[in-house]
Each structure stands twice: as structure tokens, then as C-alpha cells.
Image (tube, rainbow, N blue to C red):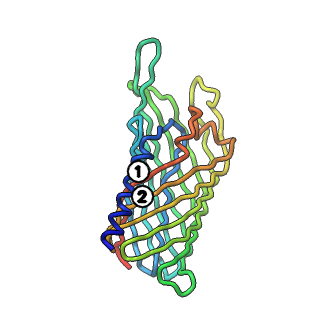
Amino acid sequence: MKTSISKIQYSLGFIALLSLLSSCSPAIYNANAINAPLLSKKGNTKISLGSTLGTEVLFNNNLQGAYAISDHLGLMVNSMQHKFRRTNSSFGSSSTSRHKEIFTEAGLGYYSAIGNSSKWRWECYGGFGLGKTRETEPNNELIISAPFRRFFAQPSIGFVSRYFDAALSVRGSYLSVGQINWVGDIRNGTTVHGAIIEPCLTIRAGGRRIKPFLQYSWMFPEDRLAPVIDLDGLIAKFFTLQLGVSLNLKG
């Protein structure tokens, strides 16, 4: 078992290195990590803390929790803080802008074992979240600000054991961004709506109570969301890697 866990950890480390080499483009909206707790029974409580570190001194920190209200109903609460510093050069001079995005959501869902198995499980959550993006110049002059809200539905199927968990999830969201405050840009004063589909793989390996985890997700937004998700015409940011620690506190 120890040999198997070591192989998994080496593999996750290699994938993480490859992902960190990809660039991260600026955006008004950045997706938070997907919470796939795979709860087992009433009272089961899980908390995870994860982060993405990329280029342009970017940090995307996620704190997530889930609690089993009953043997089949679960509650989740998720929060994200996304921030980075970006250097802009023009006519021989440069300045560093600061971008900050916060987001909080809550959801309610149903979970169950698959058949008579104690290891295979499925779950489906739905919920709502609110967030805001703000980017400023070094003198604190505003560049961009925009509120956003999101509805989501998220089914998952997974495998749970003492030392290893894995989950495949798909989050479907309806995102509304705006009114956008962006003086001097064509997007100023606009509101953008659209759907997003995000397939995701979550892997946790470690002990019964504490497991390091890796999550790799993909984002497929509607074309009309491009003005707020992809500002530089780059596609690398549609792939996200999250690394962190998951705690199984009870159950």
C-alpha cells in the first residue's frame, strides 16, 4: 500500500509541475475550485484548503466545507480569494496593477452509495454564489470593478477508501457579470450572462483523516462570456490545477 501511495504522489507532483508552466491570463471572472466531498453518513464533515500558484504572481485560494445533515442530504459552503500582480509596460515605463477577486457560495445536495458498495458513491449539489472583482493601479486608481453571481448544479461520481479517494464531477453554471465598471474600455457599462460547463477530476491520497489532494478542471464557457473570462485571447487559463489538503473530521 505504501508503494502505491508513493507512486500516486510522484505522479501528482509531475502533473503539477507541467500545469504550473502554463500561463495565466487576466480576467474579470475566475472559477473557484469544485467541492466534491463524497460524504458517507449523517454527521460526516469535510474541510479542504487548496491553492493555485501560477505565473504573474497569481494566487487562487479556496476554502471549502461540507456537512452531512442526514444519511442522504449534504450542505456545502465554499469561498475563494483570487489575486495577482501584473506588470504593464508602455513607452519605456512600467507599472504594476493589483487584481483581487472574492467569491462565496452555498449549496444543498443529495448523496448515496452506488448499489450495495461501501466505496463507490454519487452525489449531486445545487446552489448559488456571489462575488466581486476589483483591479487597481499602484496609486489605488480603479481600473476594473464588477460584481457577479452564479447558479450551479454539480453531479459527481467517486471512489472512497481509507487511503485514496477519487471523484469525477461536472459543474454546470449560469453566470451573470456586471454592471462592469471599466473606464475607457468597450466593455464599460455592460452586463454579460452565459452558461459554463466544467468537467473536473479530484484525487485525494494519504491517511484516513488527512489527505493531500490534486484537482484538475477544464472550463468550457459560452462564446458570449469571452469578454469577461478571457481578456488576452489566451486559452491556458481554461485549465486549472488546484493543490491542497482535505480533512475528514467526522464520520
At label 2, counting other C-alpha atoms closer than 10 Å, the crowd grade (few under 14, some 14-19, many 20 or more) is many
Which residue position holds label 2?
214
* In the depicted structure, whether residue 69 falls above or below residue 78: below
Q: Position of residue 134 (x, y in %)?
A: 48, 37
Circle 1: element type: helix
Q: Is residue 85 above or below residue 59?
A: above
Closer to the camera, 105 or 17?
Answer: 17
Q: Position of residue 210 (x, y in %)?
A: 32, 68
Please determine whether, in this image, residue 165 is positioned above or below residue 149: below
- For numbered disc 2, what is the local secondary structure? strand
**Residue sitting at x 53%, y 41%:** 236
Residue 167 as seen in the image, left or right of residue 225: left
Q: Which residue is mark 1?
A: 16
The amino acid on which the numbered mark 1 sits, given as a three-letter code, is Ala
Residue 17: tell me if it is visible. yes
**Image marks 2 and 1: residues in contact by CB distance under 8 Å:** yes
The answer to which quarter of the image holds residue 183 is: top right
**Residue 61 seen from this side:** no
Choose the circle earlier in sequence order: 2 or 1: 1
Task: For marks 2 and 1, give the CA distance.
Answer: 8 Å
Viewer-side label of 2, 1: 1
User: The residue under label 2 is which amino acid type?
Assistant: Leu
Residue 244 in which image quadrant: bottom left
